Image (spheres, grey):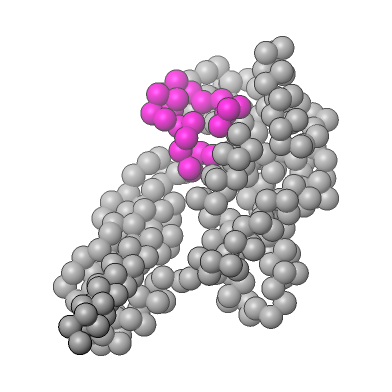
Amino acid sequence: MGGVLPAPGPERKQQLAVFLKTSRLRFRNQKLLDQAFVHRSVSNESAYRSNNERLEFLGDAILGAVTAALLYEEMPDKPEGELAKIKSVVVSENVLAAVARELQINTVLLLGRGEELSGGREKNAILADTLEALIGALYLDSGYKAAFVFISRWMRVEIHRVQDNRSYRDYKSLLQEMTQRLFRSYPVYRLVKRSGPDHEHIFWMEVKINGEVFGPGMGKNKKSAEQEAARIAYLAFAEVTRTNSQERRAST
């Protein structure tokens, strides 16, 4: 069986120190910090089996709890359903990956050779998962308060952005309302393919509306892939509606 993660050497310690300075974080346990950046592809290709997956599991739960608390505080007038929709956007893979890039997590990631060659250092899924692992490590190292402060620093910005842009719209609901109004029918979703290992599936869904197929949308689960397919279809119909409206105005 594999061993544990070795202690970081002098060069790695310096790399981690630079990360802590730029991210404005403090860690007592540097080995724990280092483990947050170890992708499973490293353990797949080496003698030891320690990676950041358990930290990611922990960090995901803490991130969800803190974000829910922030939303409860920031949006006292929103019902539970609306808060849930906003939360799903704020902690989405794309948002977390963007935060990870701002923190320059990609510069301290440890990847296996195969994942490195396939561009893993810039993959949204890996960056988002590593950010969650960092949150889990911070919680273990410094407690809930430190994790709350760190998450708040980034998630409050995203919450305000969602409020300003209304980017949390539920495209599945919007698309269903539109198709009922236009065609008196419902969108039909279909799984196109599923790729990736068992613990990291990527789903591809398409949606059929009045005989026309849109997508596919991609996501880490069927629900998010359906949401992306619905977004593609809804925006396509919105563009057609906008064009038709402009043509009608021009002809009058």
User: Where the N terminus falls, by quadrant?
Assistant: top right
Residue plotted at (55% across, 45% down): 98
Residue plotted at (50% across, 50% down): 94
Left or right of residue 237: residue 66: right
Question: For this rendering, which residue is in front, 130 or 46?
Answer: 130
Left or right of residue 37: residue 66: right
Dominant secondary structure, magenta: helix
207 part of magenta stretch: no
Residue plotted at (65% across, 33% down): 36
Left or right of residue 95: residue 225: left
Residue 171 is situated, as x and y percent measured from the top left of the image, at: 41, 70
Q: Check the image and name the residue furthest to the top.
A: 10
Residue 202 is situated, as x and y percent measured from the top left of the image, at: 39, 48
Residue 208 is situated, as x and y percent measured from the top left of the image, at: 23, 69
Question: Can you say whether 57 is above or below 226 in the image?
Answer: above
User: Where the C terminus falls, by quadrant?
Assistant: bottom left
Question: For this rendering, which residue is in front, 105 or 133?
Answer: 105
Question: For this rendering, which residue is in front, 240 or 86?
Answer: 240
Residue 214 visible: yes
- Residue 178 location, quadrant: bottom left
Extent of the magenta region: 106-127
Question: Can you say whether 98 is above or below 65 in the image?
Answer: above
Left or right of residue 237: residue 145: right
Q: How many marks?
A: 0
